[in-house]
Image (cartoon, rainbow, N blue to C red):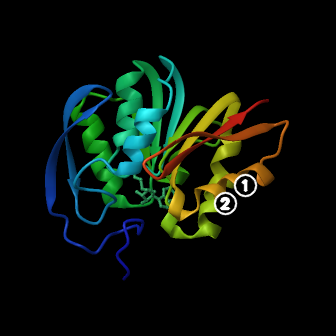
Amino acid sequence: MSDHYFTAEPASAAEQRSLSLELAGRPVTVRTAGGIFSPDGLDKGTAVLLHEVPAPPASGTFLDLGCGWGPIALTLALSSPDATVYAVDVNERALDLARANARSLGLDRVHVSRPDGIPGDVSFDLIWSNPPIRVGKAVLHDLMRTWLPRLAPGGVAYLVVQKNLGSDSLQRWLADELPAPGYAVSRFASDKGFRVLEVRRVR
Ligand SMILES: C[S@@+](CC[C@H](N)C(=O)[O-])C[C@H]1O[C@@H](n2cnc3c(N)ncnc32)[C@H](O)[C@@H]1O
């Protein structure tokens, strides 16, 4: 079996470890393990996203698309005391860790599940994602086609993508796929070789 971080059941040993870091300005200790994305610390792209995006509103329904061990979902929930946060991934080990991390921080407003675990009638005021670029364009585009139309009118998505891994072509593809006036696609920020793309659902 291949053992990329985006496989459903990673073959590599689970060696759990504990990681102390700051999320939403708070010191937290979380659990990570081999076989998932960025188990030894906050990924550089995720750090750029969390640094660049505007603070989320205090309430609403938010999505972390491709949650890994949960840094983005946990930040959303720690920042927004009345928000409901959904976190999805296909990697079962990542889901277990994200769930355990939310529980240990007392964040029962974080709902961690496989992508098909979110009821179809839920729409999102905010999506934050460090999306899985290495799955290839076809899968990535499918993910975008599936989740971005689930933004509520007025909702906004922020996606961080490494410039070398095709951020500009993804931005062009999004602008073609989600045309104005329904959506507005733009480059929101650029830092350390990453772009943060913004997709705003206008109506
Ligand atoms: C770049 S990582 C980001 C992980 C985490 N959000 C972080 O910032 O550390 C992308 C994540 O997307 C997940 N993923 C891959 N394919 C997916 C899919 N079809 N639906 C949801 N998540 C997926 C991967 O397993 C991986 O955990």
Circles 1 and 2: CB distance less than 8 Å? Answer: yes
| Quarter of the image that includes the N terminus | bottom left
Q: Amino acid at mark 2?
A: Ser
Question: Please, what is the three-letter code of the amino acid marked with disc 1?
Answer: Arg
Whether residue 18 sits left or right of residue 81 in the image: it is left
Res 119 label: none
Q: How far from the left and from the top, in percent, is residue 185?
A: 71, 42
Q: Is mark 2 within 8 Å of ligand 1?
A: no
Give how far apart the Cα atoms at labels 1 and 2 are.
5 Å
In the picture, the disc for residue 169 is 2
Name the residue that disc number 1 marks.
172
Q: Position of residue 30 (x, y in %)?
A: 20, 42
The C terminus, quarter of image: top right
Q: Position of residue 161 (x, y in %)?
A: 52, 53
Q: What residue appears at the point 30 percent right and 47 percent down from the top-left corner?
A: 42
Residue at position x 78%, y 53% in the image = 177
The residue sitting at 36% across, 50% down in the picture is: 44
The image quadrant that residue 27 belongs to is top left
Residue 109 in view: no
Q: Quadrant of residue 14?
A: bottom left
Q: Say whether residue 116 is left or right of residue 37.
A: right
Residue 132 in view: yes
x then y, percent, for residue 194: 48, 50
Element on which disc 2 rests = helix
- Taking the image in four quarters, ligand 1 sits in the one at bottom left
Side (left or right) of 145 relative to 189? right
Q: Across the whole image, how many numbered discs are drawn on residues?
A: 2
